[in-house]
Image (cartoon, rainbow, N blue to C red):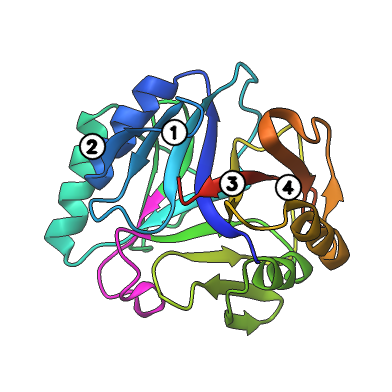
């Protein structure tokens, strides 16, 4: 049985503070994760969670992935920006042009994110987190489409995007040029399997699609893996259905 997206994980020196920030920005509920780490869940409890995992590794350069938050109106965009600033976020300059409608911010741990202007057709109907926008190749977009069995909803000029068949947040890859990877990614995906699924068969399937094993294989009931672009991800045993 195919693994499912269980969580988007932040490695951070501020797990509790970052959880409070994102809970406040998104209106998601604080909850315990599978290993008693800090996590937040969407109000309806459906879909993935966001986990905040303790890490002392310093941030070096821009993250390879960031959230694009949606807006329903110009006023809603201003409210989201104001709420993020009040909770400890800050404005940052990543080279955006003055005429661009989105607002670029960083959370209290320096992780970049964008608040997208209202009327963005590509993110219509996706929810509060319109996209996890990633720096990556066309190959990695194809890999994740097969890994999650999410269809491609964009594949043009080496840019790709996938979305669950049930809708929600898109995952996008911007194509070349892809900046060299430096250190461990601060954001990574965690996949999970139902209790009765064959863990070894699923990790073998991911390997056949182009993943590789990473250090820490098998620790805490998880496989530590890398996608074709070298991005870390984990596959957890028997998390779904708990």
Q: Position of residue 219 (x, y in %)?
A: 74, 29
Check disc 4: other Cα within 10 Å, few if <14, some if 14-19, many if 20+. some
Quarter of the picture holding the N terminus: bottom right
| Marks 1 and 3, how far apart at CA | 14 Å
Residue at left offset 86%, top offset 50%: 212
- Pointer 1 with pointer 2, Cβ within 8 A: no
Q: Which numbered disc, 2 or 3, marks the residue closer to the eye?
A: 3
The quadrant of the rendering that contains the C terminus is top left
Marks 4/1: CA distance? 22 Å
**Helix, strand or loop at mark 2:** helix
Classify 10 Å Cα crowding around label 2: few (below 14), some (14-19), many (20 and above): some
Residue displayed at 27% across by 75% down: 119
The residue wearing badge 1 is 33
Q: Is residue 125 visible?
A: yes
> Disc 2 and disc 3: Cα gap in Å?
30 Å
Q: Which residue is mark 4?
A: 231
Q: Which residues are magenta?
A: 114-129
Q: Secondary structure at mark 1?
A: loop
- Where residue 204 sits in the image (x, y, percent)? 84, 58
Among numbered discs 2 and 3, the one appearing first in the sequence? 2
Element class at badge 3: strand
Taking depth in this image into account, of 200 and 150 the one nearest to the observer is 200
Q: Which residue is mark 2?
A: 24
Q: Residue furthest front?
A: 196
Q: Residue at x 76, y 35 (%)?
A: 182
Q: Residue at x 26, y 44 (%)?
A: 28
- Disc 3 to disc 4, how far (Cα)? 23 Å
The label on residue 238 is 3
Q: Say whether residue 22 is left or right of residue 173.
A: left
Mark 1 and 3 residues: CB-CB less than 8 Å, in contact?
Answer: no
User: Is residue 39 depicted above or below 190 in this figure?
Assistant: above
Q: Earlier in the sequence, mark 1 or mark 3?
A: 1
């Amino acid at each position: 049985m195919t693994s499912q997206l269980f969580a988007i994980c932040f490695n951070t020196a501020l797990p509790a503070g970052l959880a409070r920030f994102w809970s406040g920005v998104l209106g998601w509920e604080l909850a315990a994760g599978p290993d008693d780490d800090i996590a937040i869940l969407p109000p309806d409890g459906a879909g993935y969670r966001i986990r905040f995992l303790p890490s002392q590794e310093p941030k070096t350069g821009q993250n390879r992935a960031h959230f694009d938050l949606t807006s329903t109106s110009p006023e809603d965009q201003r409210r989201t920006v104001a709420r993020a600033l009040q909770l400890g976020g800050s404005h940052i300059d990543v080279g955006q042009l003055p005429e661009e409608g989105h607002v670029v911010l960083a959370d209290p741990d320096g992780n970049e994110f964008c608040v997208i202007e209202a009327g963005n057709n590509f993110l219509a109907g996706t929810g509060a987190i319109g996209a996890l926008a990633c720096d990556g190749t066309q190959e990695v977009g194809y890999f994740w489409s097969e890994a999650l069995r999410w269809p491609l909803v964009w594949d043009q000029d080496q840019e790709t995007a996938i979305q669950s068949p049930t809708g929600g947040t898109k995952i996008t890859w911007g194509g070349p040029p892809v900046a060299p990877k430096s250190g461990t990614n601060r954001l990574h995906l965690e996949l999970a399997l139902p209790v009765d699924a064959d863990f070894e068969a699923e990790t073998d399937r991911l390997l056949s699609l182009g993943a590789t094993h990473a250090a820490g294989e098998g620790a805490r009931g998880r496989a530590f893996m890398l996608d074709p672009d070298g991005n870390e991800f984990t596959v957890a045993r028997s998390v779904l259905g708990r």
